[in-house]
Structures are given as C-alpha cells and as structure tokens.
Image: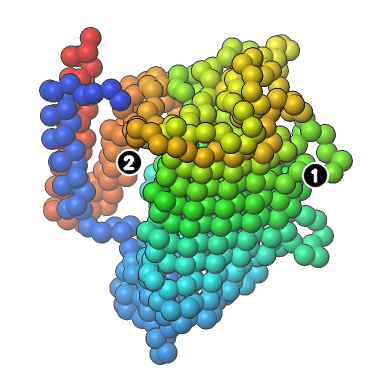
Amino acid sequence: MRTQIHDNPIDHGRACALSRGTWRRVGAKLACAGACALMAGQLLLPSVALAADWVNVGGTQYDAGTATGDEAGTWSWDGADDMKLNGYDGGSIGAKGNLTIGVTGTNTVTADAGQSAIAVKNGNLAITGDGTLNATAQNDVITAIGDGRTGGDVTISGVSVNATALGAAENVAGIRATAGSVTIDKGADVKIEAKSAEGSWRPMEIICGIHADNIPNRHAAQEGEQEEPDSAYEHGGDITVDGASLSIKTGDASWASMCINTFGIKKNTLMKIVNGADVTLSAGSAASLSAGISARSQAGAVWMLVEKSNLTSRSLSAASGIDADRNQSFGIMAEANTRFETPRIQIFKSKIEASGATAGIYAINRNGANATLFRAAMIDLQGNAMITTPTDGAVRDVKKVVDTGQWSSSQSGQVIGVAGSSAISDIVGSAEVAHDVAIDFGDGQEPDPTPDPEPAPEPDPMPNPEQKPDLKPVDKDAKTTTAVTKTVTTKTAAGAKSAFGVLAATGDNAATAAAALGIAGASVIGAGFVAFKHRNR
C-alpha cells in the first residue's frame, strides 16, 4: 500500500465532441467454426486486463493481488476486479483496468477539485447492486477511458445513482465514456444534474449529462507503449437505456448543453431506449447547440430506437442575442454523414414528447464535401404511432443543397412538422417545422425494431475536411461484415501481440497455444466470408 497525492490518472481535458443479408451455408459454417475457435482461444488466455492493476480509494493506492478494505467495512476490494461499497462516505475511487462496484446501502463519493468521483482507465466500469450511490465532482463525475479497442464502457445495473457535476471546469459530464459506450439497465434509477459553474470567471463551454464516443485520449495508451495521437476506432459511441429510469438536467453553457450526446468518427452509432425505459431530459440554453438528445456520426450512420418506452426530451430556447443560424435547439436530433446507409430514428409503441426552438424531432444525413444529396435520414413511426402534437402533424422531408464552390454542402432527411407534402428546404425559422411534438401509439403488428444497416463499402467523405482524423482507409469488405471484422481486429491485434510478444517470451505455452487458436479461428472466419462472397457472385 502506498499513499499518493490524489493523482487520478484520468485525462479530464477532453471536450464533448460535436459523434443483413443472410449468410450462405458454407460460409456460415466456416465462420461459426472460426468464431468457436476464436472464443476458445480467448477463454484460455490468462486474465490480463480482466482485473484492475490497482485501485485508489480516497487518495491511497492499493496494488492488485491482495484483498483490502477499511476496518469499518464501508468498502472492500478483492485485489482483482470486484469492489464493494456499503455505507461508504469518502473521497474519489479510481482504478486501472476493469472494475465492478457492488453497491449496498447509501454511499457517498465526493471528489476533490479536478478529480472524478469514480474513474477507470484502460478498463470497463460496472456499478451494480440494490443500494444508492451519490457521486459529486466539479467536472466528469463517473468516467471510463478505453484505448479504442477495449475498455471505456460504463454499465449501471439495478442500482440507484445520483450524479452531480458542479461545473467548475470548461467541459463536464455526469457520465463520460471515452472510446466506450454507456448502458443503464435492469431497473437502475439514474439521476444526473450537470450544473453551470457558480461564481466562475467564465461559463463552461460544454455541458453533457451523458457523453459517449469512439475517440480515445492521446494518453490512453498502455503504460510502456509509445503514445499515439487522437484517432477513432470501431468501439464506443453507443448508449442504451434498457428497462431503467433516467433523468438528466443540464445547465446553460457558452457553447453546447446536451443531456445525451453520442459521437462517432468513421463509425455507425446506435442509441436505444427500450423495454419500458422511462427517460426525462431537460437541456439548458447554449450559443451553439442545446439538445435533449444529440446523436452524431462523422463518416457514419446514426440509428436511434425508442421501443415500448416513455421519452420526454426538451431543450431551452436559443440564447438571447444569438443568430438562429448559429444556434440550434432540438428535443431529439440525429445527424449522420454516410453515402451508403439510411440513418433513422425509429419509434415503436412509445410515448414521446420532444421540444426544441429549432425543431422537436429532426433526422438528417449531411454531405459536407459537395452538393450531392446522400440517402435521406428517416423518422420511422411504427406500430400505429400517431403524431398528436401538432394537430394533423406529419413527417416532412427536408432537402437542401448549397452549392458555393469550396463550401458546397447538402442535407437530406426528415422533420416532424405541420401537415404538408412538399420538402422543406431549411428548417431554421420555418413555420412548417414543429417545435413541440407529441407522439402516442395505437394497436399494431409488432415489426422487427432493430435497425437494419445497409452495406457501406467505404467511409463517406468527412463533413469538415480540416477535422479529418489520421486514420487508415477502412477495408471495403470489412465494412460489409461489421460483426466479423470487429472480432478479428480486436482480438488478433491485441491478443496476438500479448500472446506472442510477452507470454511466449516467458515460456507460457498454454497462453501461446490459446492465442494461436484464437488467430486460427479468426482465419477460419475470414475463409467463411470468402466462401460466402464466392457463392454470391
């Protein structure tokens, strides 16, 4: 055990960024065999990165391998990945590696200035149990950081969580998943308040209730490895609320105030509110963007599903003195940038209330490279969903092309508006756009509510070329088989390096064999895909 000045290793400088066909028989069998081999190889590998290397509780760091806790029994750690809280009232909790926190009774975590209440680096964070966790911090309250391939996920299951961000930093979030995703499920009750700073020398730039992206920090590389510049990966940027309750309120901000913010670069992102979830969102005003839900993807599609749930999502009016062209205010907004797929907001047997000074519900597919219209984003109402506000409301098409040479752009999508059939060229200030929207449902046949992505052979142009990350080109075939490619990339790149670069050097034959089996499985998966491609020619 060693004491340190509370040096939480989480980089808080990041801002909230403003992001099936059927297999043929032979290919499917080969792919399944490969997947089994790959899974077997992974299961045989030692539990590297499956547990925390250390935890820090209230400023004292404890290394892995030895169980520890306080004499009063308010907290304990098994020396691996399991921590228990029962009546804890103290300082920040941090970890390097995966950490599951089981919560019993009422617990309070209060962070010092510049620290998160609970933070995990290079791992996933899970908060479970039947108790209550009250967490307070000036900046990000609960956070996990991944390296773009693994880690970064935050899962809250069953437990009651009250997260308060006091707002004494430029960018704050109640829950932040950097290069990771957020899941709230199994009856969890989560309340988040992200405040504007009181007595601060300047208002905060960005306030988020929940933020998830696929962009790892420059400092997220494993210790001992060369630091890599910011980039984007397949992992991260998704948010799920499944059979749980979520309430978020965000304060006013100088740039953006968003209750839920998802962002992906060269990645399709998915947001789900399903299975009886109850979500209430209220965003403060801001000079650039105020939104209850802001889901964005740069060079990718956005899919949003609200199924058998209740959702109220509101944003405040535009900040006074701000030009409407600069300020955008939405209840629900999905903004994609993809040439080959159809982004959509799908609503099935749910009750929705959405309000925004620009639009209540808006789905758009933008092309910032030239004036060519991409496939229109959809607002897909299913199960006899009915627009009850405005009266005689309708889903209206939005099509706009701006051809000004270097700054050509286009947008194609849909918005909830008043009755009409013509396409709306510009939603800003349009009397045909509904600012307050209510959707109810009747009886109807239940469809398959899962978004059905269409193949995307290559990434779409970036909406802003100056912000294009330094990425390798996305393989055309890999994009058409997302699930398979993710397995190969994640496990072979990291697993092979670990198994043959480290474990084999120490004479760990079992680990080497396991890694080899995993790579063999990945190879068979590839063979299955080749067979599938050949059969379809």
Task: Give how far across and how far down residue 194 sits, in percent.
Answer: 64, 59
Q: Nearer the viewer, mark 2 or mark 1?
A: 1
Task: Give how far across and how far down residue 169 sits, in percent.
Answer: 69, 59
- Taking 146 as reference, is 119 above or below it? below
- Check disc 1 and report the residue beneath it: 319
Q: Earlier in the sequence, mark 2 or mark 1?
A: 1
Residue 375 tag number: none
- Taking 148 as reference, is 140 above or below it? below
Give the position of the C terminus as an image quadrant: top left
Amino acid type, label 2: Thr
Residue at image x 28%, y 33%? 484
Give the side of residue 299 with respect to residue 64, left or right: right
Residue at image x 29%, y 38%? 487
Task: Tell me the element at label 1.
Answer: loop
Residue 326 seen: yes
On the image, which quarter does residue 307 sit in? top left
Give the side of residue 365 with respect to residue 221, left or right: right
Q: How is the image coloured?
A: rainbow
| Residue nearer the viewer, 35 or 293 | 293
Dot 2 alpha-carbon crowd within 10 angstroms: few under 14, some 14 to 19, many 20 or more: some
Amino acid type, label 1: Ala
Dot 1 alpha-carbon crowd within 10 angstroms: few under 14, some 14 to 19, many 20 or more: many
Task: Give how far across and how far down residue 176 sits, in percent.
Answer: 53, 54
Residue at image x 27%, y 46%? 495
- Check disc 2 and report the residue beneath it: 490
